[in-house]
Amino acid sequence: MREVTLSYPQTLWLAEGTAPEDLHNEAARYDARDDVLTVNPDFPIYRALLEQQLDEHSSDPEAAAIITEKLRQWWELVLVECIDIAKRLSASPEELARRTSIHTLTAAMSPLSPIAQHLRREVPQQLGRGDRSSGPAPRPPRRTDRRVV
């Protein structure tokens, strides 16, 4: 076995309603120079998934905070893992820029079914109901993580 060092970028979530023009209808932007991922919470697909989950649990006053936290954890995990993989596969800064473009990161967030399934399982657990055998939620990524593969 060999040890692989995962290198996750620093992640910044924009405040709602503050996305710059280049992130309008886009999920995120990655700045390789500073190793910073900027996530747009106004991205329509993110908003739609959030609203869907909030509607499903509208009768529970604790649900909004839990849903927002869980969705952000999963959303961020997918994005930072995409960036980590791009870093490993890229032979040049230009190739890394192509692999982590705004459009590439947005496309990576298109398959929402896995995230929605995790939320449907984890939110009821956090609210004290539902099957607890589904395993833990993802931990928020750290800047550098190590895994043995």
Image (cartoon, helix red, strand yellow):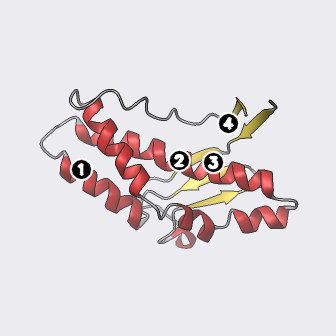
Query: In this figure, which residue is indicated by the disc labeled 4?
Result: 143
Query: In this figure, which residue is indicated by the disc labeled 3?
Result: 81
| Mark 2–mark 1 CB contact (< 8 Å) | no
Check disc 1 and give the amino acid type. Answer: Leu
Q: In which quarter of the image is residue 129?
A: top left
Q: Residue, x 34% and y 44% (percent of image)?
A: 119
Query: In this figure, which residue is indicated by the disc labeled 2?
Result: 76
Determine whether the residue tagged by mark 4 lies in a helix, strand or loop: loop
Quadrant of the rendering where the N terminus is positioned? top right
Q: Residue, x 49% and y 59% (percent of image)?
A: 40
Give the Cα distance between marks 2 and 1: 19 Å
Near mark 4 (Cα within 10 A), the count class, few <14, some 14-19 or many ≥20, is: few
Q: Earlier in the sequence, mark 4 or mark 2?
A: 2
Taking depth in this image into account, of 65 and 84 the one nearest to the observer is 84
Q: Earlier in the sequence, mark 2 or mark 3?
A: 2
Query: In this figure, which residue is indicated by the disc labeled 1?
Result: 54
* Residue farthest left in this picture: 59
* Residue farthest front in this picture: 1
Check disc 4 and give the amino acid type. Answer: Arg
Picture coordinates of residue 8, whole percent (x, y): 68, 42
Quadrant of the rendering where the C terminus is positioned? top right
Choose mark 2 or mark 3, whichever is in front.
Answer: 3
Give the Cα distance between marks 3 and 4: 11 Å
* Residue farthest right in this picture: 92
Determine whether the residue tagged by mark 3 lies in a helix, strand or loop: helix
Check disc 3 and give the amino acid type. Answer: Glu
Give the Cα distance between marks 2 and 3: 8 Å
Give the Cα distance between marks 4 and 2: 12 Å
